[in-house]
Image (tube, helix red, strand yellow):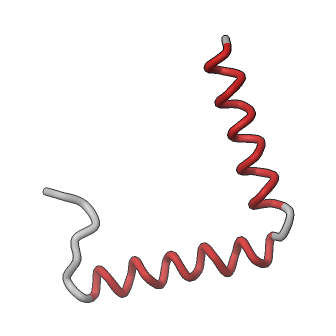
Amino acid sequence: MEQYNCALNECNQVIEELCLDIDSTEVLCSQILENVIENINNGLMPFKK
């Protein structure tokens, strides 16, 4: 039960941090997506075959 409560608290913390400022979260996610697309276009494979 302790592990469940810790996981639930961690999830709540992540939600609180990411949902307080939706615009900033959208910018962050867009930057991550751009980096991933750039890496793929440069030949980096995100997953091992």
Q: What's the residue at 71%, 31% (across, down)?
A: 8
| Residue 7, above or below 23 | above
Count of numbered tags = 0
Residue 30, relative to residue 6: is it above or below? below
Residue at 13% in and 56% down: 49
Outermost residue to the top? 1
Q: Name the spot of residue 36 as percent of width and height, x first.
A: 40, 77
Q: Nearer the viewer, residue 22 or 2?
A: 2
Q: What residue is rendered at 76% in x and 46% in y?
A: 13
Residue 28 lies left or right of residue 38; in this view the side is right
Q: Give how far across and how far down residue 41 sits, in percent.
A: 28, 87
**In the image, residue 16 lies at what x, y percent?**
81, 52
Left or right? Give the position of 38 relative to 8: left
The quadrant of the image that shows the N terminus is: top right
Q: Residue at x 65, y 20 (%)?
A: 4
> Where is 32 relative to 41, above or below?
above
Above or below residue 3? Residue 18 is below
- Specify the quadrant of the image occupied by residue 43: bottom left
View extreme (left): residue: 49
In the picture provided, is 46 more to the left or to the right than 24?
left
